Amino acid sequence: MLTSAARGVFPIAPTPFFDDGRIDTASIDRLTDFYLGCGSTGITVLGQLGEAPKLSHEESVAIAAQVIKRANGLPVVVGVSAPGFAPMRALARDVMDRGAAGVMIAPPNTLRTDDQIANYYRQAAETIGADVPFVIQDYPLTFSVQMTPAVIRRIVAESASCVMLKHEDWPGLEKITTLRGYERDGSMRHIAILCGNGGLFLDYEMERGADGANTGYCFPDMLCDVVRLSAAGERAAAHDLFDAHLPLLRYEQQPGVGLAVRKYVMKRRSLLASEAQRKPANPLTPTARAEVDHLLERLARHDPRARL
Amino acid sequence: MLTSAARGVFPIAPTPFFDDGRIDTASIDRLTDFYLGCGSTGITVLGQLGEAPKLSHEESVAIAAQVIKRANGLPVVVGVSAPGFAPMRALARDVMDRGAAGVMIAPPNTLRTDDQIANYYRQAAETIGADVPFVIQDYPLTFSVQMTPAVIRRIVAESASCVMLKHEDWPGLEKITTLRGYERDGSMRHIAILCGNGGLFLDYEMERGADGANTGYCFPDMLCDVVRLSAAGERAAAHDLFDAHLPLLRYEQQPGVGLAVRKYVMKRRSLLASEAQRKPANPLTPTARAEVDHLLERLARHDPRARL
Amino acid sequence: MLTSAARGVFPIAPTPFFDDGRIDTASIDRLTDFYLGCGSTGITVLGQLGEAPKLSHEESVAIAAQVIKRANGLPVVVGVSAPGFAPMRALARDVMDRGAAGVMIAPPNTLRTDDQIANYYRQAAETIGADVPFVIQDYPLTFSVQMTPAVIRRIVAESASCVMLKHEDWPGLEKITTLRGYERDGSMRHIAILCGNGGLFLDYEMERGADGANTGYCFPDMLCDVVRLSAAGERAAAHDLFDAHLPLLRYEQQPGVGLAVRKYVMKRRSLLASEAQRKPANPLTPTARAEVDHLLERLARHDPRARL
Amino acid sequence: MLTSAARGVFPIAPTPFFDDGRIDTASIDRLTDFYLGCGSTGITVLGQLGEAPKLSHEESVAIAAQVIKRANGLPVVVGVSAPGFAPMRALARDVMDRGAAGVMIAPPNTLRTDDQIANYYRQAAETIGADVPFVIQDYPLTFSVQMTPAVIRRIVAESASCVMLKHEDWPGLEKITTLRGYERDGSMRHIAILCGNGGLFLDYEMERGADGANTGYCFPDMLCDVVRLSAAGERAAAHDLFDAHLPLLRYEQQPGVGLAVRKYVMKRRSLLASEAQRKPANPLTPTARAEVDHLLERLARHDPRARL
């Protein structure tokens, strides 16, 4: 089960499809093996970029179950965000029954006030059950919901099952500092903070007190290295590696384009059989594809893993 | 099957629950019978105020199937709005298989530009299948999506299966006039326009060219009368009846409060066994309840149906 | 100076223009005299519907000064909302120097969290000076900023110069009850609550504990009567009068259309020389005009003031 | 006068203040001289990060006039965005009288539909006068207004005085390609496209057909070099220089934090006497300051201009 002691890298897994839209289970296994092999400490499936809304309930459960089984004990977190509590509860129970370590919940984009946000998470925690560990997804850029550190503290206080923050506020460095300050002054119990937002600030987020990364950048092996180097105090090496990837990472972090870049590179890395998205899809143009190739070529000068 | 010749009143049915959250199927029958008896020309289920997001897929299909069967040939429209096309398609196919006349689709609240809106409806129409008649739900107050008359015309042009507009823009009178103008100048084929927004402007919407009402006000019998009187040219009588209900209708139209008022009055009218909502619920305070009682008392001076 | 003891009706004054866009100072005087004559206890100028953003600083100050002088001691509140603190401060100081009783401040529509809202009002209060009484304008429908009762309490606690709430949340009845509850339990000092939102719920708002109205409905004399009747405990008479106006009041309350209706009726009432708005204007169509005429005709059966 | 032939780099100038909030005119001159010296082809003042809303009209005009005079013929564009057309017109006329080359107009964040956006720019163009060249600021991340390429084409068609796009949509690469395609297929006349968004994609934006940069990154000299190298076809050199700056550039691009980073670095570069912002200010924390120092140190290994 997921606990607040989680750390390291939980890659956000894309959902592999064949060109005709069927789920590509072989690629799911290949991807899971790759995550395990490169040093991931967990895996998150059916997140924002896992094309979750394009999957039926049955497909979602099947994908989660497959990854859980293949991950062989590594904790698997499942995104269960939904517009209503009925489907959220159904998915949460079904994947927990199949061995998920916890679930991730994003706020609906209609929430505005602190009270609304805190109430939502309290009700969600009740809905899925007090025995299900959950991750708060704090991504204002995508969800239009702004959570202050004080609101996060309130959610943590109100739900013992809240164990982790997927931190992707932007800007977000001071937020990590404030939350860690709450822990130090005793006003909030410790929770894991793993960073998303494409990894765009992972270099300094680690230095601010983050426990790792929880994002889907197409080189999760780089994320693992940076988190490891940073945790080991090898600051210069961590920044050097991160900076080498930053041009591509920034390119991948474009809203609405990111998934296509990610799948394209993962196909070039032979992790996915196809870069296909389910409809409605947002594929790369030939020019964008050439730009990614150019970025990979330049990256390869610094990181041999980009020699494809 | 629903066609663009639809007119009259399609009440938006609430979903009846027992106090413990179970679906109250007896009340579903009673309500359906009432709708038939008071002159409705159709019924819409699982709309915004039908608590659809709190229902599982199986429950949604069961409710639709029950109403369809009981309605005995009266067209039943089913709300299938969903954050992803997979659940939308699944629900649409399942209810059409059980005899639904068509489906209603609201836009996700992330849409902004005209292109985004038009693309969404084109993809949605493809997803549910060209043989499924659909209703556009145009409710900016709730969905934060603003559709110009030109965008609606574009959707109508691009999807032959678009047959009706649930018109609930606010303000919206000029929109009806503009759309009817498009029909007259030949730039748009005819579609049915039935008005929602709680019925707040139904009096003048009928005079602007609307074909009827598609809303859930707790006196659907009044809606039927007003639409009938208005269509028959009995203007003063239509306005007199409408105005008598306006204080209560306005009270019911409060966002977030409306459903509780509606269910409370329908319980007082013996149409529902309970006013319960599924969690997360937003019940009436005792003061609000007393205000509704007061409104009913005052209404009873003009409309005997309010003598409860 | 405006204090928390304010009550009664502060009409929101429109800004009268000639057809060519010049300010019509004769109509300003006529309107001010009318407000005084019908029992207003204050006047608010340069509010949301006073076309304030279309006025230069000099024009704004001149209009405020004219009304203040003509109002002859009746408190005049001036809207000073602005995207930056520099113009807000300049306008606040200039109108206070000319005898304004206080200012009204709406939140910029970028505010989301409780902290952001509270910080904004604390900074605004500092900017205009601790000696300037101010009114919070709480109108989420227009400003997209949602203030909980707890945030309002916080603003009141942090700024001694906050003396009044222009209450126009929707729904808002429970908010009044909650705020008055804070006063009773000693957690918030008393502030005046005058209601806006076009007056759409004034009937019950008075019964919930509001001190009066602060809105621009085209029959401010009706508002004065309803507030007086309600305060005097003449409940039935208050509701009867209010209900007679509700069809027109609801029509005027349409976003974006309201100002044109208001100016048209005020012209028909001989209060304004012209219904012109400064550009960009949103005038009534002939059909809308006929609808307003029809509403006035029907209203005249109940209220002789509508015989125009 | 600004024309559609504009190209190169128009830095967005910050407004220099002393610690006590007074405007620092000596730093304005120093900054202007620096912009001229490093190869800028124009200057934009009073943009989003110029703290324009904190300035009075008189201060705004004075700053613009000083830069115009000092720039000695280099075109100066002045941001005149305002919530109302009265102050927009006043500022536009006053700065054009003092020699500005054109003005920049951002959309108010209430605009949603294509029609609303197009109407706004048509009215704005009329308001400032057909003789005043203007720049569209297209920054959805900040203004929440999404302009499709087709809407931009419509604005260009409707207003001959629209000569430039400050392109800062995100993602935005395909937008440049689409707009240049419109020019090639003859459906839109040529306009200058200079890129903002902190410069985060300047490397590929130039390759997509942009004419240069229009942003305030703290090393405008780097922007000038990258634009020059890119225009000269020295692709590798352009990317190498850009990539070296990307870690800092990304850090500066954080919403709400960027201005403080920019002013801090410009002070370290001896371009500003103080990093002070006018209230309400958002200063750097000591930790953030140390992070910027660290970024500069690392940058200095590649670009000697960062040796401070």
Image (tube, coloured by chain):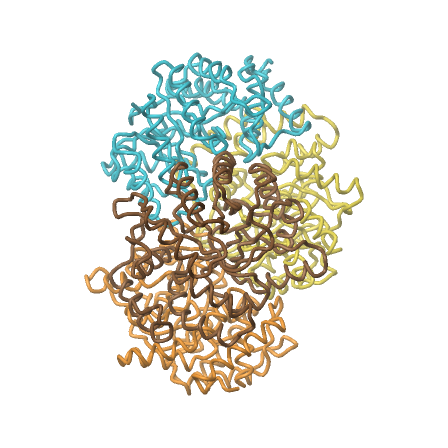
Chain colours: A cyan, B brown, C orange, D yellow
**x and y, in percent, of residue C4 in the image:** 30, 71
Which quadrant of the figure has residue B294?
bottom left
Answer left or right for D230 relative to B31: right
State the residue at coordinates (61%, 34%).
D201
Q: Quadrant of residue B111 in the image? A: top right
Q: Position of residue A12 (x, y in %)?
A: 45, 25
Nearest the eye: D115 or D24 = D115
Residue B5 position, x and y percent, is: 60, 55
Q: Residue at x 73, y 32 (%)?
A: D231
Residue A152 in view: yes
The N terminus of chain A: image quadrant = top left
Residue A9 visible to the viewer: no
Residue C70 rendering spot, x and y as whole percentages: 46, 85
The residue positioned 56% from the left and 35% from the top of the image is A256
**Nearer to me, C182 or B284:** B284
Q: Quadrant of the C terminus of chain A?
A: top right
Q: Quadrant of residue C133?
A: bottom left
Q: Nearer the viewer, residue D13 or B78?
A: B78
Identify whether B49 is placed above or below A3.
Answer: below
